[in-house]
Protein backbone atom coordinates (compact mmCIF):
# COMPACT_ATOMS: atom_id res chain seq x y z
CA UNK A 1 0.00 0.00 0.00
CA UNK A 2 1.47 3.41 -0.92
CA UNK A 3 2.22 4.11 2.65
CA UNK A 4 1.05 1.01 4.38
CA UNK A 5 -2.36 1.66 5.99
CA UNK A 6 -4.07 -0.62 8.41
CA UNK A 7 -6.97 -0.46 10.81
CA UNK A 8 -5.93 -1.18 14.34
CA UNK A 9 -7.77 -4.42 14.85
CA UNK A 10 -7.20 -7.97 13.44
CA UNK A 11 -4.02 -9.40 14.71
CA UNK A 12 -1.29 -9.62 12.11
CA UNK A 13 0.23 -9.84 8.75
CA UNK A 14 3.12 -11.82 10.08
CA UNK A 15 2.35 -10.64 13.59
CA UNK A 16 0.82 -7.49 12.18
CA UNK A 17 -2.66 -6.12 11.95
CA UNK A 18 -4.52 -7.13 8.81
CA UNK A 19 -7.10 -9.70 8.00
CA UNK A 20 -5.56 -12.70 6.33
CA UNK A 21 -6.59 -13.48 2.78
CA UNK A 22 -8.59 -16.71 2.99
CA UNK A 23 -9.29 -18.49 -0.28
CA UNK A 24 -10.61 -21.94 -1.09
CA UNK A 25 -13.91 -23.20 0.27
CA UNK A 26 -12.17 -25.24 2.94
CA UNK A 27 -10.23 -22.17 4.00
CA UNK A 28 -13.31 -19.97 4.20
CA UNK A 29 -15.19 -22.64 6.17
CA UNK A 30 -12.22 -23.14 8.46
CA UNK A 31 -11.83 -19.46 9.21
CA UNK A 32 -15.55 -19.11 9.81
CA UNK A 33 -16.05 -22.11 12.07
CA UNK A 34 -12.63 -22.93 13.48
CA UNK A 35 -12.98 -26.44 12.06
CA UNK A 36 -9.52 -26.50 10.52
CA UNK A 37 -7.87 -29.64 9.14
CA UNK A 38 -4.69 -30.88 10.74
CA UNK A 39 -1.67 -30.97 8.42
CA UNK A 40 -2.06 -34.70 7.82
CA UNK A 41 -5.63 -34.16 6.62
CA UNK A 42 -4.67 -31.68 3.90
CA UNK A 43 -4.42 -33.58 0.63
CA UNK A 44 -4.62 -32.10 -2.85
CA UNK A 45 -7.45 -33.20 -5.11
CA UNK A 46 -6.80 -36.28 -7.21
CA UNK A 47 -6.28 -34.27 -10.38
CA UNK A 48 -3.92 -31.72 -8.85
CA UNK A 49 -0.21 -31.55 -9.46
CA UNK A 50 1.91 -32.93 -6.61
CA UNK A 51 3.55 -30.26 -4.50
CA UNK A 52 4.86 -31.48 -1.17
CA UNK A 53 6.68 -28.32 -0.10
CA UNK A 54 3.73 -26.42 1.45
CA UNK A 55 2.61 -29.52 3.39
CA UNK A 56 6.20 -30.13 4.49
CA UNK A 57 6.36 -26.60 5.90
CA UNK A 58 3.20 -27.19 7.88
CA UNK A 59 4.68 -30.44 9.16
CA UNK A 60 7.94 -28.73 10.12
CA UNK A 61 6.10 -26.05 12.06
CA UNK A 62 3.93 -28.65 13.80
CA UNK A 63 7.02 -30.67 14.68
CA UNK A 64 8.72 -27.60 16.17
CA UNK A 65 5.64 -26.91 18.30
CA UNK A 66 5.46 -30.53 19.45
CA UNK A 67 9.14 -30.58 20.42
CA UNK A 68 8.68 -27.39 22.42
CA UNK A 69 5.72 -28.89 24.27
CA UNK A 70 7.80 -31.96 25.16
CA UNK A 71 10.61 -29.69 26.41
CA UNK A 72 8.24 -27.54 28.47
CA UNK A 73 8.79 -24.40 26.39
CA UNK A 74 6.33 -22.28 24.40
CA UNK A 75 5.02 -24.16 21.34
CA UNK A 76 3.68 -20.92 19.84
CA UNK A 77 7.08 -19.21 19.98
CA UNK A 78 8.78 -22.33 18.60
CA UNK A 79 6.30 -22.42 15.74
CA UNK A 80 6.86 -18.73 15.03
CA UNK A 81 10.61 -19.28 14.87
CA UNK A 82 10.06 -22.14 12.43
CA UNK A 83 7.90 -19.92 10.23
CA UNK A 84 10.53 -17.18 10.35
CA UNK A 85 13.24 -19.62 9.27
CA UNK A 86 11.09 -20.80 6.37
CA UNK A 87 11.20 -17.35 4.75
CA UNK A 88 7.42 -17.27 4.38
CA UNK A 89 6.73 -13.55 4.21
CA UNK A 90 3.07 -13.91 5.11
CA UNK A 91 3.28 -16.93 7.40
CA UNK A 92 1.81 -16.41 10.86
CA UNK A 93 1.13 -18.40 14.00
CA UNK A 94 -1.87 -17.58 16.18
CA UNK A 95 -2.37 -18.72 19.73
CA UNK A 96 -5.84 -20.19 20.34
CA UNK A 97 -7.00 -16.89 21.82
CA UNK A 98 -5.56 -14.88 18.96
CA UNK A 99 -7.25 -17.08 16.39
CA UNK A 100 -10.55 -16.67 18.20
CA UNK A 101 -9.96 -12.92 17.99
CA UNK A 102 -9.24 -13.29 14.29
CA UNK A 103 -12.55 -15.10 13.79
CA UNK A 104 -14.34 -12.37 15.71
CA UNK A 105 -12.71 -9.81 13.42
CA UNK A 106 -14.23 -11.58 10.43
CA UNK A 107 -17.57 -11.00 12.13
CA UNK A 108 -16.76 -7.29 12.43
CA UNK A 109 -15.72 -7.05 16.08
CA UNK A 110 -12.27 -6.35 17.50
CA UNK A 111 -10.32 -5.10 20.49
CA UNK A 112 -8.47 -1.83 20.06
CA UNK A 113 -8.63 1.94 20.35
CA UNK A 114 -10.37 2.69 17.05
CA UNK A 115 -7.90 4.35 14.72
CA UNK A 116 -6.45 3.75 11.28
CA UNK A 117 -2.77 4.51 10.65
CA UNK A 118 -0.21 4.32 7.89
CA UNK A 119 3.50 4.78 7.40
CA UNK A 120 4.58 7.83 5.45
CA UNK A 121 8.26 8.72 5.02
CA UNK A 122 9.21 6.65 8.04
CA UNK A 123 6.55 8.18 10.28
CA UNK A 124 3.23 6.77 11.49
CA UNK A 125 0.28 8.94 10.58
CA UNK A 126 -3.31 8.58 11.76
CA UNK A 127 -5.52 8.40 8.67
CA UNK A 128 -8.93 7.88 10.25
CA UNK A 129 -10.58 7.68 13.68
CA UNK A 130 -13.70 5.61 14.25
CA UNK A 131 -16.68 7.33 15.83
CA UNK A 132 -17.56 6.45 19.43
CA UNK A 133 -14.15 4.90 20.05
CA UNK A 134 -11.47 5.57 22.69
CA UNK A 135 -9.38 7.41 20.08
CA UNK A 136 -12.30 9.66 19.15
CA UNK A 137 -13.13 10.35 22.79
CA UNK A 138 -9.50 11.43 23.33
CA UNK A 139 -9.74 13.96 20.51
CA UNK A 140 -7.29 12.22 18.18
CA UNK A 141 -7.82 13.27 14.56
CA UNK A 142 -6.81 12.17 11.10
CA UNK A 143 -3.46 13.72 10.23
CA UNK A 144 -2.06 13.44 13.75
CA UNK A 145 1.35 11.81 13.98
CA UNK A 146 1.76 8.83 16.29
CA UNK A 147 5.20 9.06 17.87
CA UNK A 148 5.19 6.37 20.57
CA UNK A 149 3.14 3.58 22.14
CA UNK A 150 3.73 2.91 25.85
CA UNK A 151 7.07 4.68 25.57
CA UNK A 152 8.24 2.75 22.51
CA UNK A 153 9.14 5.03 19.62
CA UNK A 154 7.31 3.93 16.47
CA UNK A 155 9.18 5.97 13.84
CA UNK A 156 10.65 3.61 11.27
CA UNK A 157 8.66 0.60 12.48
CA UNK A 158 6.33 -1.33 10.17
CA UNK A 159 2.70 -0.42 10.70
CA UNK A 160 1.97 -4.05 11.51
CA UNK A 161 4.25 -3.85 14.56
CA UNK A 162 2.65 -0.59 15.63
CA UNK A 163 -0.78 -2.19 15.40
CA UNK A 164 0.38 -5.04 17.65
CA UNK A 165 1.61 -2.50 20.21
CA UNK A 166 -1.69 -0.65 20.11
CA UNK A 167 -3.73 -3.80 20.57
CA UNK A 168 -1.69 -5.32 23.36
CA UNK A 169 0.22 -8.56 23.53
CA UNK A 170 -2.64 -10.74 24.77
CA UNK A 171 -5.60 -9.86 22.56
CA UNK A 172 -7.87 -12.17 24.54
CA UNK A 173 -7.32 -10.11 27.70
CA UNK A 174 -6.45 -6.66 26.34
CA UNK A 175 -9.95 -5.15 26.47
CA UNK A 176 -9.99 -2.77 29.44
CA UNK A 177 -6.22 -2.37 29.61
CA UNK A 178 -4.62 1.01 28.99
CA UNK A 179 -2.17 2.18 26.37
CA UNK A 180 -0.29 5.49 26.40
CA UNK A 181 0.18 7.21 23.04
CA UNK A 182 2.68 9.94 22.20
CA UNK A 183 1.13 12.22 19.58
CA UNK A 184 2.02 15.25 17.52
CA UNK A 185 -0.13 17.76 15.63
CA UNK A 186 1.78 20.52 13.95
CA UNK A 187 4.04 22.00 16.64
CA UNK A 188 2.03 20.52 19.50
CA UNK A 189 3.25 17.29 21.14
CA UNK A 190 1.25 15.55 23.86
CA UNK A 191 0.36 12.19 25.39
CA UNK A 192 -2.97 10.44 25.80
CA UNK A 193 -3.78 7.36 27.85
CA UNK A 194 -6.53 5.34 26.23
CA UNK A 195 -8.39 2.28 27.49
CA UNK A 196 -8.64 -0.51 24.94
CA UNK A 197 -12.22 -1.58 24.27
CA UNK A 198 -14.19 -4.28 22.55
CA UNK A 199 -15.52 -2.51 19.48
CA UNK A 200 -17.74 -3.32 16.55
CA UNK A 201 -18.10 -1.60 13.25
CA UNK A 202 -20.00 -1.60 10.03
CA UNK A 203 -17.69 -2.80 7.31
CA UNK A 204 -19.83 -1.11 4.65
CA UNK A 205 -21.11 2.45 4.84
CA UNK A 206 -22.96 4.43 2.18
CA UNK A 207 -23.00 8.20 1.64
CA UNK A 208 -24.45 10.38 -1.07
CA UNK A 209 -22.42 13.37 -2.23
CA UNK A 210 -23.87 16.63 -3.58
CA UNK A 211 -24.77 15.98 -7.18
CA UNK A 212 -26.00 12.46 -6.56
CA UNK A 213 -22.79 10.39 -6.49
CA UNK A 214 -23.11 7.37 -4.19
CA UNK A 215 -20.00 6.48 -2.19
CA UNK A 216 -19.81 2.89 -0.94
CA UNK A 217 -16.99 2.59 1.61
CA UNK A 218 -15.78 -0.92 2.46
CA UNK A 219 -13.25 -1.08 5.29
CA UNK A 220 -12.85 -4.88 5.35
CA UNK A 221 -14.43 -7.94 3.78
CA UNK A 222 -16.10 -9.40 6.84
CA UNK A 223 -19.02 -11.79 6.73
CA UNK A 224 -21.96 -10.37 4.82
CA UNK A 225 -20.11 -7.37 3.43
CA UNK A 226 -20.43 -8.56 -0.17
CA UNK A 227 -24.22 -8.70 0.08
CA UNK A 228 -24.19 -5.26 1.70
CA UNK A 229 -22.31 -3.84 -1.30
CA UNK A 230 -24.82 -5.41 -3.68
CA UNK A 231 -27.72 -4.00 -1.68
CA UNK A 232 -26.13 -0.53 -1.69
CA UNK A 233 -25.78 -0.63 -5.47
CA UNK A 234 -29.41 -1.69 -5.89
CA UNK A 235 -30.58 1.16 -3.62
CA UNK A 236 -28.48 3.85 -5.32
CA UNK A 237 -30.39 6.30 -7.53
CA UNK A 238 -30.64 4.97 -11.08
CA UNK A 239 -28.81 7.98 -12.55
CA UNK A 240 -26.04 8.03 -9.93
CA UNK A 241 -22.45 7.14 -10.50
CA UNK A 242 -20.79 5.05 -7.80
CA UNK A 243 -17.47 5.44 -5.99
CA UNK A 244 -16.32 2.18 -4.40
CA UNK A 245 -13.92 3.36 -1.71
CA UNK A 246 -11.43 0.62 -0.80
CA UNK A 247 -8.81 2.89 0.75
CA UNK A 248 -7.45 1.37 3.92
CA UNK A 249 -9.28 -1.90 3.26
CA UNK A 250 -7.01 -4.56 4.76
CA UNK A 251 -8.76 -7.49 3.07
CA UNK A 252 -10.68 -10.33 4.65
CA UNK A 253 -12.76 -13.18 3.30
CA UNK A 254 -12.21 -13.48 -0.42
CA UNK A 255 -15.70 -14.95 -0.89
CA UNK A 256 -17.07 -11.59 0.24
CA UNK A 257 -14.83 -9.72 -2.22
CA UNK A 258 -16.14 -11.96 -5.01
CA UNK A 259 -19.70 -11.24 -3.87
CA UNK A 260 -18.92 -7.52 -4.04
CA UNK A 261 -17.53 -7.99 -7.56
CA UNK A 262 -20.86 -9.59 -8.48
CA UNK A 263 -22.53 -6.22 -7.82
CA UNK A 264 -20.77 -4.78 -10.86
CA UNK A 265 -20.19 -7.75 -13.18
CA UNK A 266 -22.50 -10.05 -15.09
CA UNK A 267 -20.66 -13.22 -14.13
CA UNK A 268 -17.23 -14.07 -15.46
CA UNK A 269 -13.73 -14.36 -14.06
CA UNK A 270 -12.69 -12.47 -10.91
CA UNK A 271 -9.30 -14.12 -10.26
CA UNK A 272 -7.28 -17.28 -10.64
CA UNK A 273 -5.15 -18.82 -7.92
CA UNK A 274 -3.19 -21.92 -7.06
CA UNK A 275 -3.19 -24.06 -3.93
CA UNK A 276 -0.44 -26.65 -3.64
CA UNK A 277 -0.09 -26.79 -7.42
CA UNK A 278 -3.79 -26.97 -8.26
CA UNK A 279 -5.06 -24.13 -10.44
CA UNK A 280 -8.46 -22.74 -9.54
CA UNK A 281 -10.68 -19.83 -10.52
CA UNK A 282 -13.14 -17.49 -8.84
CA UNK A 283 -16.19 -16.26 -10.75
CA UNK A 284 -18.74 -13.53 -10.15
CA UNK A 285 -22.42 -14.32 -10.07
CA UNK A 286 -24.45 -13.10 -13.06
CA UNK A 287 -26.83 -10.17 -12.92
CA UNK A 288 -24.64 -7.33 -11.65
CA UNK A 289 -24.92 -3.70 -12.76
CA UNK A 290 -22.59 -3.38 -15.75
CA UNK A 291 -23.79 0.04 -16.93
CA UNK A 292 -23.56 2.50 -14.07
CA UNK A 293 -20.30 4.59 -14.09
CA UNK A 294 -17.91 3.25 -11.45
CA UNK A 295 -14.70 4.55 -9.87
CA UNK A 296 -12.68 2.50 -7.37
CA UNK A 297 -10.59 4.45 -4.84
CA UNK A 298 -7.42 2.75 -3.57
CA UNK A 299 -4.28 3.60 -1.62
CA UNK A 300 -1.36 1.94 0.09
CA UNK A 301 -3.78 0.54 2.67
CA UNK A 302 -5.71 -1.43 0.03
CA UNK A 303 -4.57 -5.02 0.26
CA UNK A 304 -5.28 -8.70 -0.28
CA UNK A 305 -8.97 -9.38 -1.01
CA UNK A 306 -9.49 -5.67 -1.74
CA UNK A 307 -6.71 -5.84 -4.33
CA UNK A 308 -8.30 -8.92 -5.86
CA UNK A 309 -11.56 -7.00 -6.32
CA UNK A 310 -9.78 -3.92 -7.68
CA UNK A 311 -7.78 -5.98 -10.18
CA UNK A 312 -10.90 -7.73 -11.44
CA UNK A 313 -12.84 -4.51 -12.02
CA UNK A 314 -9.83 -2.85 -13.65
CA UNK A 315 -8.87 -5.76 -15.92
CA UNK A 316 -12.40 -6.25 -17.13
CA UNK A 317 -12.81 -2.58 -17.98
CA UNK A 318 -15.62 -2.14 -15.48
CA UNK A 319 -14.10 0.64 -13.38
CA UNK A 320 -11.57 3.44 -13.44
CA UNK A 321 -9.16 3.02 -10.53
CA UNK A 322 -8.10 6.26 -8.81
CA UNK A 323 -5.60 6.77 -6.00
CA UNK A 324 -2.15 5.37 -5.29
CA UNK A 325 -0.50 1.99 -5.71
CA UNK A 326 -1.97 -0.71 -3.48
CA UNK A 327 -0.01 -2.76 -0.97
CA UNK A 328 0.73 -5.92 -2.93
CA UNK A 329 -0.46 -8.93 -0.94
CA UNK A 330 -1.57 -11.73 -3.24
CA UNK A 331 -0.69 -14.79 -1.17
CA UNK A 332 -2.96 -17.77 -0.57
CA UNK A 333 -2.60 -19.19 2.92
CA UNK A 334 -3.57 -22.55 4.35
CA UNK A 335 -4.42 -22.72 8.07
CA UNK A 336 -3.41 -25.79 10.06
CA UNK A 337 -4.03 -26.68 13.69
CA UNK A 338 -0.91 -27.27 15.80
CA UNK A 339 -0.64 -29.80 18.67
CA UNK A 340 -1.36 -27.21 21.38
CA UNK A 341 -4.45 -25.85 19.61
CA UNK A 342 -2.72 -22.84 18.04
CA UNK A 343 -3.00 -22.25 14.30
CA UNK A 344 -0.27 -21.81 11.68
CA UNK A 345 -1.17 -20.11 8.41
CA UNK A 346 1.44 -20.70 5.71
CA UNK A 347 1.59 -19.54 2.12
CA UNK A 348 0.67 -22.25 -0.39
CA UNK A 349 0.10 -20.20 -3.55
CA UNK A 350 -0.73 -16.85 -5.13
CA UNK A 351 -3.61 -15.32 -7.02
CA UNK A 352 -3.68 -13.44 -10.33
CA UNK A 353 -6.07 -10.93 -11.84
CA UNK A 354 -8.21 -11.91 -14.86
CA UNK A 355 -5.50 -10.72 -17.27
CA UNK A 356 -2.89 -12.83 -15.47
CA UNK A 357 -1.19 -10.11 -13.44
CA UNK A 358 0.46 -11.15 -10.21
CA UNK A 359 -0.29 -8.88 -7.25
CA UNK A 360 2.05 -10.14 -4.53
CA UNK A 361 4.88 -7.65 -4.13
CA UNK A 362 3.56 -5.61 -7.06
CA UNK A 363 0.24 -4.13 -6.03
CA UNK A 364 -2.30 -2.58 -8.36
CA UNK A 365 -1.33 0.61 -10.21
CA UNK A 366 -4.28 3.02 -10.47
CA UNK A 367 -5.41 4.39 -13.82
CA UNK A 368 -5.22 7.89 -12.34
CA UNK A 369 -2.76 8.80 -9.59
CA UNK A 370 -4.26 10.91 -6.81
CA UNK A 371 -3.72 11.15 -3.06
CA UNK A 372 -4.82 14.30 -1.27
CA UNK A 373 -7.84 15.00 -3.49
CA UNK A 374 -8.67 11.45 -4.49
CA UNK A 375 -12.42 11.67 -3.85
CA UNK A 376 -12.68 14.94 -5.77
CA UNK A 377 -10.76 13.40 -8.66
CA UNK A 378 -13.12 10.44 -8.58
CA UNK A 379 -16.06 12.82 -9.00
CA UNK A 380 -14.36 14.42 -11.99
CA UNK A 381 -13.82 11.01 -13.57
CA UNK A 382 -17.46 10.07 -13.03
CA UNK A 383 -18.55 13.27 -14.74
CA UNK A 384 -16.36 12.34 -17.69
CA UNK A 385 -17.88 8.87 -17.78
CA UNK A 386 -21.29 10.43 -18.26
CA UNK A 387 -22.84 10.24 -14.82
Image (tube, helix red, strand yellow):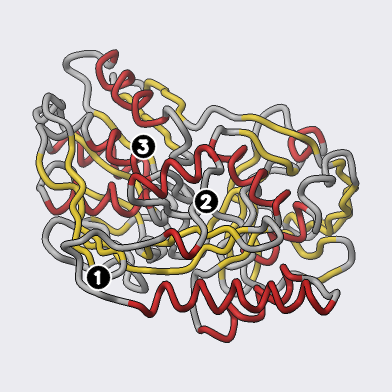
Indicate whether 214 appears above or below 333: above
Residue position marked by numbered label 2 in the rendering: 19
What's the CA distance linking mark 3 and mark 2?
13 Å
Residue 130 point in image, percent of width and height: 64, 35
Residue corresponding to mark 3: 256
Classify 202 as above or below 344. Answer: above
In the displayed structure image, the side of residue 261 where residue 119 appears, left or right: right
Q: Earlier in the sequence, mark 1 or mark 3?
A: 3
Circle 3 residues within 10 Å: few <14, some 14–19, many ≥20: many
Answer with left or right where residue 248 lies relative to residue 157. left
Q: Secondary structure at mark 2?
A: loop
Q: Left or right: where does residue 68 sit relative to residue 348?
A: right
Disc 1 to disc 3, how far (Cα)? 24 Å
Residue found at x 44% / y 65%: 2
Q: Position of residue 77 (x, y in %)?
A: 73, 73
- Name the residue at 50% across, 45% down: 31
Displayed quadrant of residue 218: top left
* Of pointers 2 and 1, the one earlier in the residue sequence: 2
Q: Position of residue 324 (x, y in %)?
A: 36, 59
Q: Position of residue 370 (x, y in %)?
A: 34, 55
Between 274 and 229, the residue placed more toward the observer is: 274
**What residue would you read off at disc 1?**
277
Depth-wise, is mark 2 or mark 1 nearer the camera? 1
Residue 159 visible in the shown view: no
Question: Which residue occupies 18% across, 52% down?
Answer: 281
**Along the line of sight, which residue is nearer the eye, 160 or 238?**
160
Amino acid sequence: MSGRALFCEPRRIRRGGALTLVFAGVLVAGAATGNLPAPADRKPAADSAPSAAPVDRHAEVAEAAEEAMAAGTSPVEAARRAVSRSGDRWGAVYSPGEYEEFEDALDGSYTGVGLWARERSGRIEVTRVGSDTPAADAGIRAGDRLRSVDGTTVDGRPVTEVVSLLRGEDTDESAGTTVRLGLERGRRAWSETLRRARLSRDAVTVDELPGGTTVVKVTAFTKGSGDEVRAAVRRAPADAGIVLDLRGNSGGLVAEAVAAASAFLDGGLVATYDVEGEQRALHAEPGGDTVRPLVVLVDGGTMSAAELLTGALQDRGRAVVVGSRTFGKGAVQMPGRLPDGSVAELTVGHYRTPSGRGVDGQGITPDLEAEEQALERAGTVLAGLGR
